[in-house]
């Protein structure tokens, strides 16, 4: 998990915002295989998230992982109450179907919106801001669902 670069007086407020019932909720950034463009995207999101104190986990999975193994790992992230959103970076090995993998994520946890990073090229600040804004919205939705007793009993 990354450390926050929030000013000391606002650190407590930021930490309270990202917590629910004693759990530190975080964004998970997943890169499958080594990719220079995914590394650049992860750095850009990490830098932007650090400015607002957003905790995150960054995971790099092996290039030769099977579709089923990736699906299983994503399902674990998807079911975790401490993960409020998952960003699966788009450059994946050819043997994997990214659309099928993302189909298993809860809609509010999937940060790869249509049009976001589906094409090659440099990382644009507007895209990073859009991803981080989507993560904030996902956090609010996830937090409200954790507070809803009917949601807890349905799980």
Image (spheres, helix red, strand yellow):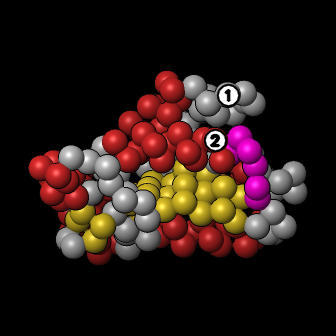
Q: Is residue 64 above or below residue 55?
A: below
Q: Position of residue 74 (x, y in %)?
A: 60, 65
Residue placed under numbered mark 2 in the picture:
40
- Percent of width and height locating residue 25: 34, 63
The magenta segment: 33-38
Q: From the viewer's perspective, is 13 left or right of 24?
A: left
Q: Viewed as shown, does residue 27 lie left or right of 7? A: right
CB atoms at circles 2 and 1 under 8 Å apart?
A: yes
Residue 128 counted in the magenta span: no
Q: Whole-percent x and y of residue 153?
A: 29, 75
The local crowd at label 1, few if under 14, some if 14 to 19, many if 20 or more residues have their Cα within 10 Å, is few
Mark 2 surroundings: few (<14), some (14-19) or many (≥20) residues within 10 A:
few
**Of 78 and 126, the residue lying toward us:** 126
Q: Callout 1: helix, strand or loop?
A: loop
Task: Name the residue: 74% across, 45% down.
Answer: 36
Between 28 and 144, the one nearer to me in the picture: 28
In the picture, which quadrant includes the C terminus? bottom left
Q: Quadrant of residue 100?
A: bottom right
Name the quarter where the N terminus is drawn: bottom left
Residue 122 image label:
1
Q: Quadrant of residue 76?
A: bottom right
């Amino acid at each position: 998990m990354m450390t926050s670069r929030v000013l000391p007086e606002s650190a407590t407020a930021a930490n309270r915002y990202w917590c629910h019932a004693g759990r530190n909720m975080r964004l998970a950034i997943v890169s499958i295989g080594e990719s220079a463009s995914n590394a650049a995207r992860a750095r850009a999101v990490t830098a932007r998230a650090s400015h607002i104190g957003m905790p995150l986990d960054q995971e790099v999975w092996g290039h030769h992982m099977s579709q089923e193994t990736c699906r299983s790992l994503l399902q674990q992230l998807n079911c975790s109450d401490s993960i409020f959103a998952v960003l699966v970076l788009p450059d994946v090995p050819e043997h994997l179907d990214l659309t099928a993998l993302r189909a298993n994520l809860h809609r509010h946890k999937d940060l790869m919106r249509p049009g976001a990073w589906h094409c090659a090229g440099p990382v644009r600040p507007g895209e990073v801001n859009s991803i981080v804004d989507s993560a904030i919205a996902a956090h609010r939705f996830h937090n409200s669902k954790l507070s809803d007793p009917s949601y807890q009993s349905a799980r």
